[in-house]
């Protein structure tokens, strides 16, 4: 099975997938990495791993629809079984989501459905929350609102800051993302329209 990964930044989650692949612990092959940001460090990670690294700068398109149309074309060239959004900081159009519905997973730094959107660590701290975490979920038209496949949680310590939370959450993201990707590619995890199932059991 083939995997396309969409990124915008550092790509540490992409690296987790690359490392899993290098250790024969990934149930598919990363065939392309696509970034909307030309300077994303994740492009270097892809290149270093010998993976096709494609830059598709959103600034060169005058509408979200035009950009997503171009993105669909690039993705379709690779015929992926799964599209992994690993820090892809773009809101997707309904047309894009419909085209690949049920085949897209996103990693998000919160215990969804809590803290959808940006700046999750700061908001969690501002609320004085006692726990935090990260989620891998299917992408639907609702931003950060699709069915959750797997989460990792942690207790917030009194001395946690945005920086320490970011680091702790990243470490957990790197654990759960390859697991979810493998579940999906092994045919265990499925999108059902209303939710997700793992080995036929509703999550
Ligand atoms: C992660 O925290 C992920 O949850 C969010 O964007 C960040 C990407 O980090 N969607 P990286 O580029 O994988 O290092």
Image: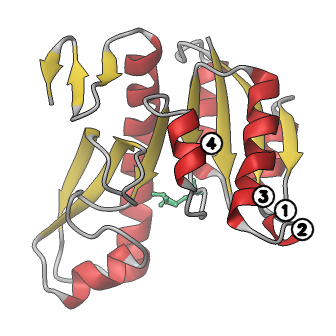
Residue 57 badge:
1
Q: CA distance from mark 4 to mark 2?
A: 24 Å
Q: Residue 155 appears in which quarter of the rendering? A: bottom left
Q: Which residue is more in the foreground, 52 or 50?
A: 52
Mark 3 against mark 2, which lies toward the viewer?
3
Q: Position of residue 198 (x, y in %)?
A: 23, 19
Residue 14 badge:
4
Disc 3 + disc 4, Cβ < 8 Å = no
For disc 4, does the CB lie below 8 Å from ligand 1?
Answer: yes
Q: Residue 203 appears in which quarter of the rendering? A: top left
| Mark 2: secondary structure | helix
Q: Position of residue 13 (x, y in %)?
A: 56, 46
Residue annotated with mark 3: 66
Q: CA distance from mark 4 to mark 1?
A: 19 Å
Q: Which residue is more in the foreground, 20 or 95?
A: 95
Residue located 43% across and 29% down the image: 102
Residue located 44% across and 64% down the image: 167
Q: CA distance from mark 3 to mark 2?
A: 10 Å
In the depicted structure, whether residue 37 falls above or below residue 98? below
Q: CA distance from mark 2 to mark 1?
A: 6 Å
Residue located 47% across and 34% down the image: 101
State the residue lying farthest toward the bottom. 126
In the depicted structure, whether residue 150 falls above or below residue 172? above
Q: Is residue 152 left or right of residue 59?
A: left
Disc 2 + disc 1, Cβ < 8 Å = yes
């Amino acid at each position: 099975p083939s995997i396309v990964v969409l990124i915008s930044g550092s790509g540490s989650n992409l690296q987790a997938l690359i490392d899993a692949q290098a250790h024969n612990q990934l149930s598919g092959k990363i065939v392309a990495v696509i970034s909307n940001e030309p300077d994303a460090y994740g492009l270097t990670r892809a290149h270093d791993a010998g993976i096709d690294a494609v830059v598709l700068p959103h600034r060169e398109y005058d509408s979200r629809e035009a950009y997503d149309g171009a993105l669909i074309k690039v993705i379709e060239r690779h015929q992926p079984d799964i599209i992994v959004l690993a820090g892809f900081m773009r809101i997707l159009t309904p047309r894009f989501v419909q085209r690949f519905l049920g085949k897209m997973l996103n990693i998000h730094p919160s215990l969804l459905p809590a803290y959808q959107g940006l700046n999750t660590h700061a908001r969690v701290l501002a609320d004085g929350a006692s726990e935090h975490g990260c989620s891998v979920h299917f992408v639907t038209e609702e931003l950060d609102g699709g069915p959750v496949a797997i989460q990792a949680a942690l207790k917030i310590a009194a001395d946690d800051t945005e920086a320490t939370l970011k680091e702790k959450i990243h470490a957990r993201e790197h654990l759960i993302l390859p697991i979810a990707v493998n579940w999906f590619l092994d045919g265990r995890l499925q999108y059902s329209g209303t939710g997700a199932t793992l080995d036929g059991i509703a999550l």
